[in-house]
Structure formats: structure tokens, C-alpha cells
Image (cartoon, grey):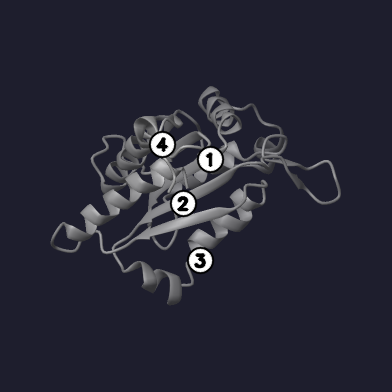
Amino acid sequence: MPRVGRGGMLAGMKTRRILVIQGHPDPDGGRLGHALADAYVAGAQDAAHAVRRLDVAKLDFPVLRRAEEFERGTVPADIRAAQDAIRWADHVVLFFPLWLGTMPALLKAFLEQVFRPGFAMDATTKLPRGLLKGRDARIVVTMGMPGVMYRLLFRAHGLRGLERSILGFAGIQPIRHSLVGMVGAPGKRHIERWLGRMEALGRKAA
């Protein structure tokens, strides 16, 4: 039986540097995704992990409109700070709501700014090489439909694109996900269960 130490940390468990990215575009907060992120952070801090938070809706950055901007454009100060936070982390947790089958446009614009050549990949070689190896991630997606429906009927296409073409392409592996469905359903039991699961995942930094 593993021994539990200070803050609920299992003896021998390695503490981690965790970056929690809140991808909901509402800057006022108060959404389920914010509550889930709060629960994850509470569990992680209770287990003595180091945690930083980043709220995409409160950052100042423009939408990229040309390939030249993506490849050689000036990196905005808030985006540079986000890149520094990702470099610092060894575990990245991304929260966002499912909109039209994928992530909100603001979050996509943020990722396009952040995952540039020279930061996310080395584009000087024949085959681009991911520069963010040594990190893993969890993606937490809230949605109105059951999570199993998004996975089986819609093939989780938006989630798969994020996993493979953005995070995985940059070398982040493994990538796990949690699909939090039926967020508008009456009753709070399933939401309370998910809050408990997020706190437990935060403790394990998984």
C-alpha cells in the first residue's frame, strides 16, 4: 500500500509542473469549463504539484491572416509569455467547450499564434521535427451531446485534429482526453461526478 504524504501526495510520486490553459472565449468566466479547471487545479495543488494558469480570453493577440505572419511575424507579448509557460510545463491541460464540432475560434487563433515554427517545430529539416517533446497533455472538452455520441457518431474529428495536427505534431505525447457530455441536462449529479474526477486527475497530474 503506497504511503500518503503531505497534501495527499503518494510517497514516491513525482511532482510535476502543470500548465492549465482555459480555452473558453468568455472572459467573464463562470462556465462549467472554469469550474472543471478550478477542480483540477485544487487537486494538483493539494498534491504539491506546481501549477500555472493561462486564460486565453484575457490575452491580447491578433488573428493571423498570412503565412508570412505565421512563419516570420512578430510574436505578441502575451503569446511569447504563453510559449514560455509551455516551455516551463511538463504537463499541459487544455479546457474548452465544443462549438460546431471543434474548438472555439478564439482558441484556434491562439494556437495558431503559439505553435509557430521555431517554437513548436523545427521547419528547417526535410520533415518538420517537434520541439516540445518531453511533455504530455490532457484535453477536457465540454459538450451538450453525450461524449460517446461525439466519439462514435462524429468520430471526435475536432479533438483528433487538435491531438494529431497541433499537439502531437509538436512532439507532445501521450495526449489523453476527457469528454464531459450532457452539460445542459437537468440535475447536478453527473456534473458533481466530473468535478470529483477532475480533482482526482489533478492530484495525479494525469
Q: Which residue is painted at 45% across and 32% down in the image?
A: 49
Numbered mark located on residue 4 in the image:
none
For disc 3, the neighbor class at 10 Å (few under 14, some 14 to 19, many from 20) is some
Numbered mark located on residue 139 in the image:
2
2 or 3: mark nearer the eye: 2
x, y percentage for residue 70?
65, 39
Q: Which residue is painted at 47% across and 48% down in the image?
A: 206
Q: Nearer the viewer, residue 47 or 169?
A: 47
Per the image, label 1 sits on a secondary structure element best described as: strand
x, y percentage for residue 109?
51, 43
Numbered mark located on residue 157 in the image:
3
Q: Which residue is painted at 40% across and 42% down in the image?
A: 202
Q: Earlier in the sequence, mark 1 or mark 3?
A: 1
Q: Earlier in the sequence, mark 4 or mark 1?
A: 4
Q: Nearer the viewer, residue 79 or 11?
A: 11
2 or 1: mark nearer the eye: 1
Q: Are marks 3 and 4 in contact (CB under 8 Å)?
A: no
Which amino acid is tagged 2? Ile
Per the image, label 3 sits on a secondary structure element best described as: helix
Q: Residue 56 occupies which quadrant of the picture? A: top left
Which amino acid is tagged 3? His
Residue to which mark 1 is pinned: 91
Left or right, 21 with reference to 114? left
Q: CA distance from mark 4 to mark 1?
A: 17 Å
Q: CA distance from mark 1 to mark 3?
A: 23 Å
Numbered mark located on residue 9 in the image:
4
